[in-house]
Amino acid sequence: MYYLMTHIRVVGALLIREMSTRFGSKPGGYLWALIDPAGHIVFLSLIFMAITRTPALGTSFPLFFATGYLSFQFYAAMAGFLNGAIKANRTLLSYPNVAPIDTIVARYILQVGTTALVSLCVLGAIGLTLRQPLHLHWPSIIEAAFAATLLGLGVGLFNNVAALRFPLYEQIFNIINRPMFLISGVFFLPDALPLPARDIVLLNPLVHVVMLFRKGFYPEYRAAGLDMFYLYCFVFSFLFVGLALFTNSVTILRSR
């Protein structure tokens, strides 16, 4: 019990430190966290409004792209923010009470809260512009967001160790991860693609995250091809491998 309370206090202190480092003491830091996703959504909406009259689902371009972009961000922002957890807190790891996993937990909590708050603000603002009120299915929304953050957590745990062992890994990961935005169903409906393109796209676990998230906003969306068992196989496989590698590399994480 003593060790648990010690780690809770350490995570709390790290959380405050991460908030100060990431957002600073000025409102501009927090404002940028909201402006960045809003800007992406507006940009996508304007581009596709110039190409077609109606979105692939529903009648609102901003809502369609917001549900795609924000659900993807629960993974992408998490994985990206966790990647530098060990490097950013290197000096603190010299203290015996600060464990490497504490830095991961602090950043995980901060990123979950940040993405959730930004999503509520952006989607709430979009909801106010709609002619018809939104009929939300919160279990689907929460489940999709939680699965995406766990996937990002597993990837982040793995990346922290791999980046220390192999100096070029971080650049390789960024190159491989960058196209994920284009093939995760952010601006299209995966189940509307013709075969065999649909089957290939559905191999991406993030596609299932986006589909589940959208089901929470569009009651009429059937989400053909959504496979939660497949998604959770990926999520818990990445989480298990990431935790196992991270746990077995504590000495390396502290020393480098």
Image: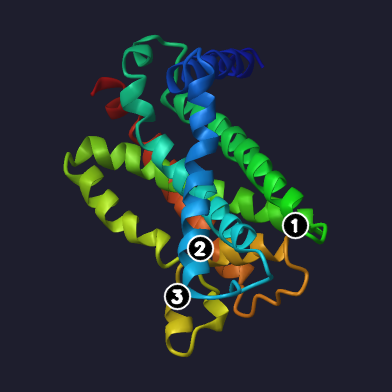
Q: Nearer the viewer, residue 59 or 24?
A: 59
Q: Amino acid at mark 3?
A: Val
Q: Position of residue 25 (x, y in %)?
A: 50, 12
Q: Earlier in the sequence, mark 1 or mark 2?
A: 1
Q: Determine whether 79 is above or below 19 in the image.
A: below
Residue drawn at point x = 58 percent, y = 37 percent: 112
Q: Residue at x 54, y 63 (%)?
A: 233
Q: Which residue is mark 2?
A: 186
- Distance of label 1 from label 2 (alpha carbons): 20 Å
For marks 3 and 2, give the CA distance.
12 Å
- Point out which mark residue 28 bears: none
Placement of the C terminus among the 4 image quadrants: top left
What residue did someone put label 3 on? Answer: 201
Task: Tell me the residue at 25%/21% (across/down).
Answer: 255
The amino acid sitting under disc 2 is Val
Is residue 105 something that shows in the picture? no
Q: From the image, which quarter does the N terminus lie in? A: top right
Please name the amino acid that badge 1 sits on: Leu
Q: Residue 89: image x %, image y %?
A: 36, 19
Image coords of residue 18 (percent x, y): 47, 20
Residue holding disc 1: 130
